[in-house]
Image: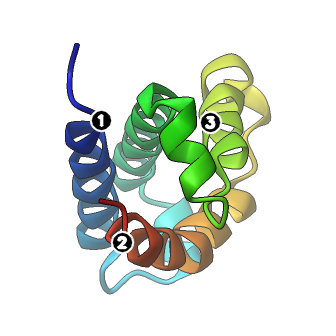
Amino acid sequence: MRDYKLFILDIEEAINKIFDYINGLDFTSFKNDPKTYDSVLHNILIIGEAANKIPREVQLKYPAIDWAGIIGMRNIIVHGYFSIDVDIVWKTVTESLPELLEKIKRIQ
């Protein structure tokens, strides 16, 4: 079994990739750049998959992290691709991910 700390590192890495991809972009540029959009969605999937692999007892030790929301976002992307709202994706990566990165870094 893979140590959960490696999944934490996967989450950090995926978040940092997203930040690199969107660096210097505004919302309009982001939504009109299909390669960046697809790359961001792919890394959100990685974040959700990794979060889902974090043992429940670890998740319970860090209730400030919205584990269900992270996993739910992954599920929306996987199962509802044609109904994904680019506005929500942008808000997630620009508002929620910076906060998530700080919280993830505190996990031991």
Please state which amino acid type lies under the numbered disc 2.
Arg
Residue situated in front as seen by the camera: 47 or 21: 47
Q: Residue at x 54, y 37 (%)?
A: 57
Q: Looking at the image, tell me whether mark 2 or mark 3 is earlier in sequence order.
A: 3
Which residue in the protein does label 3 denote?
71
Q: Amino acid at mark 3?
A: Ile
Q: Position of residue 34 (x, y in %)?
A: 43, 48
Q: Quadrant of residue 50?
A: top left
Q: Position of residue 101 (x, y in %)?
A: 40, 70
The residue that appears at 57% across and 77% down in the rendered structure is: 27
Task: Give the spatial CA distance, label 1 vs label 2.
Answer: 14 Å
Q: Can you identify the residue that label 1 sits on?
A: 4
Between disc 1 and disc 2, whose residue precedes?
1
| Amino acid found under the numbered disc labelled 1 | Tyr
Label 2 crowd (10 A; few <14 / some 14-19 / many >=20): few
**Quadrant the N terminus occupies:** top left
Looking at marks 3 and 1 on the same chain, the residue that comes earlier in the sequence is marked by 1
Which element is circle 2 on? loop
Q: Nearer the viewer, residue 89 or 26?
A: 89
**Residue found 79% across the figure and 34% down from its top:** 83
Q: Residues within 10 Å of mark 3 (few under 14, many from 20)?
A: many
**SS of the residue under disc 1:** helix
State the image quarter where residue 54 is shown. Answer: top left
The front one of 73 and 30 is 73
What residue is shown with label 2? 106
Label 2 close to label 3 by CB (< 8 Å): no
